[in-house]
């Protein structure tokens, strides 16, 4: 078994998709189903940066706030890219609602990474 470098892992993420909720939050600071922006939410550049950190961390092997059981599954998927499995990490930081980062078919021909609020799942 060959260990993957970080850059190889990032390439295994495939197409990147952001849900409408994430897109709206980046541009306005308003989370899905909220009537006003979170008062602790920082500016648009910070929100853009936060999403890019989530995606690169997710694909680099950082498990974020993911439970131990899912971390073990993710470790198996990282060791076997292209097996058709789904990689899931959870991020609940920075006074922001919980965000999921999911890569379907990690390392496969149809790999796709989606970033969404947990409430959009």
Image (spheres, rainbow, N blue to C red):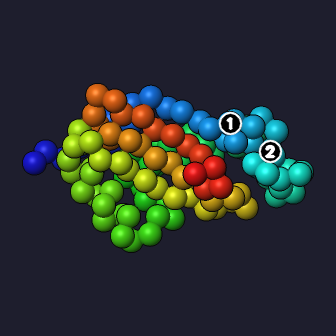
Quadrant hosting residue 103: top left
Q: Residue 45 at x, y = what percent?
A: 73, 37
Q: Residue 23 at x, y = what percent?
A: 69, 35
State how far apart marks 2 and 1 are (Cα): 13 Å
> Which residue bears the numbered disc 1?
20
Badge 2: how crowded within 10 Å, few (<14), some, or many (20+)?
A: many
Residue drawn at the location 28% of the way across and 37% of the way down: 107
Quadrant hosting residue 115: top right
Query: What numbered label is drawn on residue 29?
Result: 2
Does residue 43 appear left or right of residue 116 in this picture? right
Q: Residue 88 at x, y = what percent?
A: 43, 53
Residue found at the very far right of the displayed protein: 36
Quadrant hosting residue 46: top right
- Under circle 1, the secondary element is helix
63 above or below 27? below
- Under circle 2, the secondary element is loop
Residue placed most toward the observer, 59 or 18: 18
Badge 1: how crowded within 10 Å, few (<14), some, or many (20+)?
A: some
């Amino acid at each position: 078994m060959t260990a993957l470098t970080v850059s190889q892992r990032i390439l295994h993420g495939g197409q990147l998709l952001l849900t409408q909720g994430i897109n709206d939050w980046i541009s306005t600071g308003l989370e899905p189903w909220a009537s006003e922006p979170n008062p602790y939410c920082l500016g648009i550049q910070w929100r853009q940066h936060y999403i890019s950190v989530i995606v690169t961390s997710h694909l680099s092997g950082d498990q974020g706030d993911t439970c131990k059981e899912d971390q073990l599954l993710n470790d198996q998927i990282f060791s076997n890219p292209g097996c058709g499995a789904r990689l899931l990490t959870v991020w609940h930081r920075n006074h922001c609602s919980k965000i999921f980062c999911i890569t379907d078919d990690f390392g496969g021909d149809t790999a796709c990474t989606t970033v969404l609020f947990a409430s959009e799942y």
